[in-house]
């Protein structure tokens, strides 16, 4: 195992494949945005579910 394992090859600007006219980086942006939306929904749902404290307990 020489340095060929870590040697960069290929052209990063070259579009290797597309799906529904979108390339891999475009799909990753869509997936990341979907994860952010899901996280926001979970946080809002969890905060709405928390009981309101009236000064009792801790």
Image: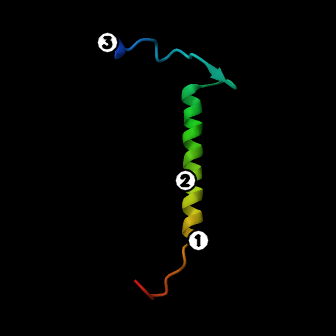
What whole-number distance in Å separates the C-alpha atoms at marks 2 and 1? Answer: 15 Å
> Which mark is drawn over residue 15?
none
What whole-number distance in Å separates the C-alpha atoms at marks 3 and 2? Answer: 42 Å
> Where's residue 48, x and y in %?
58, 70
Q: Earlier in the sequence, mark 1 or mark 3?
A: 3
Task: Give the residue furthest to the right.
Answer: 20
Task: Give the residue furthest to the left.
Answer: 2
Taking the spot 57% from the left edge, 58% from the top edge, the residue there is: 42
Is 44 on the left or on the right of 12, as rendered?
Answer: right
Q: Which residue is mark 2?
A: 39
* Vertical side of 21 occupied by 37: above or below: below
Q: Which residue is mark 1?
A: 49
> Where's residue 17, x and y in %?
61, 18
Query: Dot 3, how many residues are within 10 Å of its Cα: few (below 14), some (14-19), or many (20+)?
Result: few
Query: Dot 2, how many residues are within 10 Å of its Cα: few (below 14), some (14-19), or many (20+)?
Result: few
Q: Callout 1: helix, strand or loop?
A: helix
Q: Earlier in the sequence, mark 3 or mark 2?
A: 3
Which image quarter: residue 29? top right
**Exactly how many numbered labels are in the figure?**
3
Q: Are marks 2 and 1 in contact (CB under 8 Å)?
A: no
> Where's residue 32, x and y in %?
54, 41
Taking the spot 54% from the left edge, 73% from the top edge, the residue there is: 50
Q: Which residue is mark 3?
A: 1
Tell me the quarter of the image containing the N terminus. top left
């Amino acid at each position: 195992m020489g340095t060929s394992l870590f040697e960069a090859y290929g052209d990063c600007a070259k579009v290797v494949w597309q799906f529904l006219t979108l390339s891999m980086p475009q799909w990753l942006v869509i997936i990341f945005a979907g994860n952010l939306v899901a996280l926001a929904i979970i946080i809002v749902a969890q905060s709405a579910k928390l009981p309101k404290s009236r000064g009792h307990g801790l």
